Structure formats: C-alpha cells, structure tokens
Image (cartoon, rainbow, N blue to C red):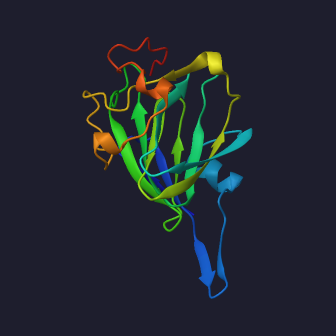
C-alpha cells in the first residue's frame, strides 16, 4: 500500500497493491498496522455502501460534535470525483479542498479526517461507493455545505444541469454562513 499526502496534509490517498492475472485481481483494502503507521489510530465501527447514477452528487456532508466522523472511502465500481473540504476554523487550509478521481479501475481510497466536509459526484453511468466510518450516524448532528458554494471554487467535472441532488443537499448553507463547530 502506498500512502500519498495531498495539499491538505490530513487528507491521504491510499493506493493498494493490486495482484491481477487472467482470473481477476486481489488487493488488500485495509491493513490496520499500515494505516496506523501512516495515518494514525482510527477505530472504524461501520461500513456503508451506496449505488448512484451519473450526476448524483452526495455532499458536502459532515457530522457535528460529539458525533464527528472520519471516513475511508473508495469507489468499487464506476467512477466518482471525491472531494474533501477543510472546515476547521483557524486552519491554514480552511476552506481549501482536495478532489480525487476514485474508480473501480484505479482502486484508490481517500482518508477524510474529522473536521472536513466530504462529498462525491458520479461521473460514470453508475457507481458503487463504499466507506468506513469511525462514529455512529446521528441524523440530528448532520451538517453540510452547499456543493456549489462559489467561495470553494470546486470543479465537479459536470455542468450544473447534470447534477442530481437530494432536497436536503440542495438547501445546505455556504461555508461563510455555516454555524461551524470545528476549530483547528
């Protein structure tokens, strides 16, 4: 496994070693020892999976304290653009984001720590997206930022009319108007 730092040092891309032959492939998607040596101790408690069609944008989401979550995400099938935004007030990278293409072909993963908003958009006809989380989902502690907040300047690789949102995601606040509980 290769651990690659991004422009947001706490957000890490993980590239597994893939062993393939005429029968298919094998990879190690998580190794606790390697993860702790390169990122730190995180106790994942739940795995989630979603399937979405082209243009579906989920995010930018986070959970407020005391239910903040770190995530380890990957795209099992298809292709997505995955985005993490630093929302920790006082951080030198506050309001900055990292975008990474995740796909069933490249098998990359991204670790998104607590204090970052996360979202992804499906670029292929459909995608199966998987993520590990280290805290319980608590709907009353849900938070988010509007996907097309002009201050963030995120290029989602799709036109606005191609994007499909939930009603909830369409009504999220901008980062500037967020009642932000995260401090660096």
Number of marks:
0
Q: Is residue 12 left or right of residue 27?
A: left
Where residue 77 sits, quadrant-wise, is bottom right
Residue 65 appears anywhere in the view: no
Q: Position of residue 33 (x, y in %)?
A: 69, 54
Q: Residue furthest front?
A: 161
User: Residue at 50% of width from left, 68% of height from top?
Assistant: 105
Q: Residue furthest right?
A: 45
Residue 18 lies left or right of residue 98; in this view the side is right
Task: Report the quarter where the C terminus lies.
Answer: top left
Quadrant assignment, res 147: top left
Quarter residue 41 falls in: top right
Viewport quadrant of the N terminus: bottom right
Residue 124, compared with residue 164, is above or below; it is: below
Query: 179 left or right of 141?
Result: left
Write the residue at 46% across / 59% down.
125
Image coordinates of residue 161 in percent, x first then y, are: 31, 41
Residue at 44% across / 52% down in the picture?
A: 54
Where does the image place residue 113, in percent across and percent down from the top left? 53, 36
Q: Nearer the viewer, residue 42 or 67?
A: 67
- Front residue of 40 and 167: 167
Comparing 85 with 10, the one in front is 85
Residue 141 higher or lower than 95, as above or below = above
Instruction: Name the residue furthest bottom.
Output: 22
Q: Is residue 163 visible?
A: yes
Compared to residue 159, the image places residue 77 above or below, namely below
Image spot of residue 134 (x, y percent): 67, 35
Q: Residue at x 37, y 41 (%)?
A: 163
User: Quick one: 61 or 70, which is closer to the camera?
Assistant: 61
């Amino acid at each position: 496994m290769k651990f690659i730092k991004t422009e947001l040092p706490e957000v890490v891309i993980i590239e597994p070693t893939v062993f393939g032959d005429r029968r298919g492939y094998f990879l190690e998607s998580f190794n606790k020892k390697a993860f702790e040596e390169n990122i730190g101790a995180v106790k994942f408690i739940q795995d989630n999976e979603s399937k979405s069609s082209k243009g579906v944008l989920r995010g930018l989401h986070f959970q407020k304290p005391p239910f903040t979550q770190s995530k380890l995400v990957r795209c099992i099938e298809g292709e997505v653009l995955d985005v993490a935004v630093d929302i920790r007030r006082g951080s030198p990278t506050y309001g900055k984001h990292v975008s990474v293409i995740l796909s069933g072909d490249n098998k990359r993963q991204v670790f998104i720590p607590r204090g970052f908003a996360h979202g992804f958009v499906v670029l292929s006809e459909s995608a199966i997206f998987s993520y590990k989380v280290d805290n319980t989902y608590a709907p009353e502690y849900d938070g988010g930022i509007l996907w097309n907040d002009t201050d963030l300047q995120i290029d989602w690789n799709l036109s606005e009319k191609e994007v499909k949102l939930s009603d909830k995601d369409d009504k999220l606040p901008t980062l500037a108007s967020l009642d932000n509980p995260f401090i660096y």
